[in-house]
Amino acid sequence: MEENQDIMRVLLNRVLTPQTTSFPEIHFGGPDHPSGQLRNLLEERIAAVPAGGSINWVTYYFRDIRLAKALIQAQKRGVHITLCLEGRPRIPYANDAAIALLKGEKGIGDALRVITIPGLPSPSDKSWKPQLHEKLYCFSHPEPVAFIGSFNPSGNDPEDDPGIILEIGDQNRGYNALVGLKDPMLVEKLIEHARRLHQSPPGLFYRSTTNADRDVHSTDTDIYFWPRIDKHPVVQFLHNVGDSARIRIAASHIRTENAANVMIKLAQRGINLEILAEATARRVTPKVEQRLLDAGIRFRRIRHTESLPMHLKFVLIEENDRAWSVFGSFNWTKPSFWLNHEIAAISRNPVIFQAFARCWDKLQSM
């Protein structure tokens, strides 16, 4: 992957303006990569931060005890750490062992912030509870970088609870991505975001307060935060794409009818729309699948012989001679649209686009 990126950098250097030469890193996990590639990336970056440096993380699942121990060792050598972690994920006890270690006598103390956001009043058979679903990993060294994407360290080695892996999938071997943004302004704002969550954990109406993070706009990449009180930025962007566009969506979760409506309207406009989706019916419902197929949309589930999860969340848009990639933690679900804390990027960076396009081609060839 790094050799391919070096080649791409040389090829694209002639067409990039001086303002867009901050080359990102794009890393993928999946059955065509070594098991644990993305968690190993995080562990290597932890080890590379010296005394006086900083590590700022926000994540949803955290079960990886080796990574937890690596953070503890980093703090002992003088690294400034903030870690924000969802306290009640979908499997409520999933993070408990890592939390106990990190909060223990030899842990990282106040550097850990376990966040549980209060929910809305809901019917007895439903739960309208926001969750901290972001995946953000910022490192000061060896050069400042902020990774966002779909991967959170939800596995453990050795695995002590196979039932959790059966439920959420083996993310260390499944399809995932992390994009390392290096634009100094983006990195600075994402670090500020992580530290703000750590200092003042969000309440239910966080987005309507003055403390809420504002969207960030750089030369070629825009960062958006959820929950929002205005329109969904990805949906709004897709609405504004021309009818001659080609749109490719890789989605781990499509459950809300609103999301299906968005996609169907795009197809009805004549847009060339393709969807690659997770295989499990819980994450992508049969009802949504049938509606998309009935609308004539090219829809395919990614099924692996070992039931590895297709956890990717990205969109590729091409219109005339322009191309954009959309990536982050967001899902096409009601909680992600309206309640959860999420991050997404909309980027014109050609290195990112080409990396996700190659990933799409691999998925499609399965």
Image (cartoon, rainbow, N blue to C red):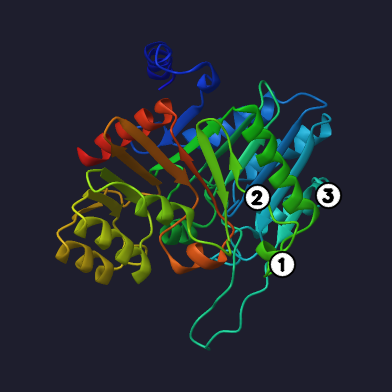
- The three-letter amino acid code for the residue at tag 2 is Arg
- Residue 169 in view in this figure: no
- Residue 320 in view in this figure: yes
Could you say which disc has been placed on residue 203 in the image? 1
- The three-letter amino acid code for the residue at tag 3 is Gly
Mark 2–mark 1 Cα distance, whole angstroms, equals 17 Å
The secondary element bearing badge 1 is classed as: loop
Compared across the picture, whether 161 is left or right of 28 comes to right
**Which residue is the site of mark 2?**
214
Mark positioned earlier in the residue sequence (3 or 1): 3
Marker count (numbered):
3
* Rendered-image quadrant of the C terminus: top left
Q: Residues within 10 Å of mark 3 (few under 14, many from 20)?
A: some
Mark positioned earlier in the residue sequence (2 or 1): 1
* The residue positioned farthest toward the bottom in the image shown: 124
Mark positioned earlier in the residue sequence (2 or 3): 3
